[in-house]
Amino acid sequence: MAVATFAGGCFWCMVKPFDQQPGIESVISGYTGGHVENPTYEQVCSETTGHYEAVQITFDPAVYPYKDLVELYWQLIDPTDAGGQFFDRGQSYETAIFYHDDEQKEIAEASKAALEASGKFDKPIAVKILPAKPFYPAEDYHQQYYRKNPLHYERYSHGSGRVAFQQQHWGQK
């Protein structure tokens, strides 16, 4: 098994698409990239800890390779938005790929360069590629939110503009 970590705005919206792929053992919502140990949701939202809302994925690379995770990640976010994602604004909602080894870094950088060169977006790709830092699981009520609160999850993912963006740019339904 291997581990991948992605920040893509609200972690609630990042879990379901990864969770539904073959070879995925777990998708955990949490916080990474900051300077406070074991931060709470309230601390992260205060924008004082330096953490990103992120998901950490444990996966079987023989079944679902890291490069496929990165390709899926691009389709879940607005990669040109440097200030957050959709109506979630601020540093804790910014995008980043946190690499766990040199191979992940190379794959992420090559994938970002390919997306930039594709011309799919008319603004620069703003996603940071950063070394992995300690990851702290979020509170239990955030875990698997799409399963625990499906109606609120659907309202949120549509109301935020995320689903419309995905449909416009990637043809997702």
Image (cartoon, grey):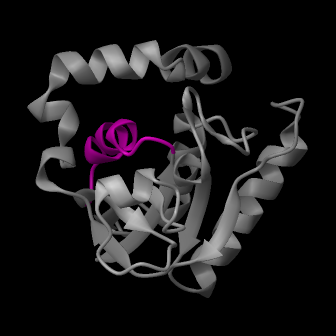
**Taking 44 as reference, is 58 left or right?**
left
Nearer the observer, 152 or 72: 152
Q: Residue at x 55, y 26 (%)?
A: 87
Q: Quadrant of the C terminus?
A: top left
Image vertical order of residue 59 relative to residue 15, above or below: below
Q: Residue 101, relative to residue 21: is it above or below?
A: below
Quarter holding residue 105: bottom right
Q: With respect to residue 110, does 14 lie above or below? A: above
Q: Is residue 143 left or right of residue 153?
A: left
Q: Residue at x 38, y 64 (%)?
A: 31
What segment carries the magenta color?
A: 9-24
**Residue 150 in view here:** yes
Q: x and y percent of residue 82 in the render?
A: 73, 45
Q: Position of residue 80 (x, y in %)?
A: 76, 39
Q: Which x, y percent locates residue 92?
A: 52, 53
Horizontal arrangement in the rendering, residue 131 relative to residue 2 (left or right): right
Direction bottom: furthest residue: 102
Residue 125 forms part of the magenta stretch: no
